[in-house]
Amino acid sequence: MPKPRTAVPGLAAPAQEDGWAKYGYLVYLVSLLPQAVFDPGFGLPNALVTLLSVAAFLPLYLRGWNGRDGRLLAYAWAIFGLGVAVTPLNGGAGVYWVYAAAAVAGLQPVAKARRMVGLFTLLAALWALALPLLQGAPWPQSSAYFFPAVFFTAFIGLLNVSTLERERYQRQLVQAAEENQRLAAIAERERIARDLHDLLGHTLSVVTLKAELAAKLAERDPARAAREMREVERISREATAQVREAVQGYKSRGLQGELASARLALEAAGVRFEYYAQALTLSPTQETVIGMALREAVTNVIRHSGATRCAIRLLKEADRVVLEVEDDGRGGVLEEGSGLRGMRQRAEALGGSLEYSGDGGTRLRLWLPTTGPERALPQAHPTALHPKPDTL
């Protein structure tokens, strides 16, 4: 499961942080209160100006939440200007500089966003240094009052730039993974179509010709017509066996495809993928059951665990083949829903079992007996998908 994004005040929010999130970030406006509460000389005019600045800020903030480029930059400059205008009366108005820097984090390209954050930080620092001189206040003591606002202008702005860039990169990874899966599905359909054409095209043509011949001979030469129909039956049985063998061949490649899909899905979700497998032999049915269990387990890790690491192991233990999926997520008591129940039923149908625990993360262990006809599964070395972790 992808980790929730760190709360950063700003207008340039990703699509998933919509709704009430934008109102939550308004809590930082409390920075306007300390001087109003603790400064005896604050006065009613200063309070009115502060309230008017908030009234001007809110529509800029709400309109700029999902603004883009030109409009976003205009909103950011307007908010920054509010900070410059109000700080002579309320030093807490430096919070507007932080909102402005957070806003420009959504600009494209990223270099432009960084430049704007740097420019706002520089202008805020210059204003913080110049304002006490213009007011005849002690310097640099009065300037030091603004240093936290200047610091957070740079810090929050750059943090938002980094966060949004990382989220854009993750979205690109997800899109690339989906595109790869789409192309792989197209290629697989084309391969299956070619295989079936090569496998059945000639056979069905022969069956058609012999059936037509038998129909013509039915009255003139019944004995020969019967021979032709027996030949049709033989060819049909052979074709059925070939189709069954081909379908089993498709299933036998399913586990490797599930492993590749698991890696793409986990890495796109920000979960570190670790994988290790011993040399194994699996029947097509066993491989199908393990592949389906792996898909369900990885889906649960991404959706529910909150994990940063997921380790997948395929092992041979005595007379068992074992699949282990372990993560470092929140763990806890697991309720057996339809997914886990389906895993268990498929495993038990082959004489195996499913075990899982939620202590210190979630650990799922599915095992199947190594009985019945088997097909060799090439050993998947850790380097094939991911370097072998020291812990495996």
Image (cartoon, grey):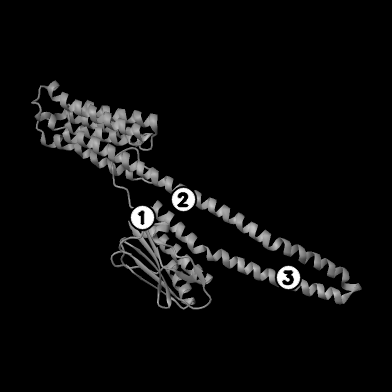
The residue tagged with tag 1: helix, strand or loop? loop
Q: Nearer the viewer, residue 200 or 19?
A: 200
- Residue that badge 2 annotates: 177
Residue at horizontal 41 percent and vertical 46 percent from the top: 171
Q: Nearer the viewer, residue 261 or 41?
A: 261
Q: CA distance from mark 1 to mark 3?
A: 52 Å
**Mark closer to the observer (1, 3):** 3
Q: Is residue 52 visible?
A: no
- Residue that badge 1 annotates: 271
Task: Report if the CB atoms under discs 2 and 1 are less than 8 Å apart.
Answer: no
Q: CA distance from mark 2 to mark 3?
A: 43 Å
Residue 307 locus on image (x, y percent): 33, 58
Name the residue at the left extreme: 138
Marker disc for residue 235: 3
Which amino acid, mark 3? Ile
Residue 63 locus on image (x, y percent): 36, 34
**Mark closer to the observer (2, 3):** 3
Q: Say which quadrant the C terminus sits in.
A: bottom left
Sequence-wise, the earlier of marks 1 and 3 is: 3
Sequence-wise, the earlier of marks 2 and 1 is: 2
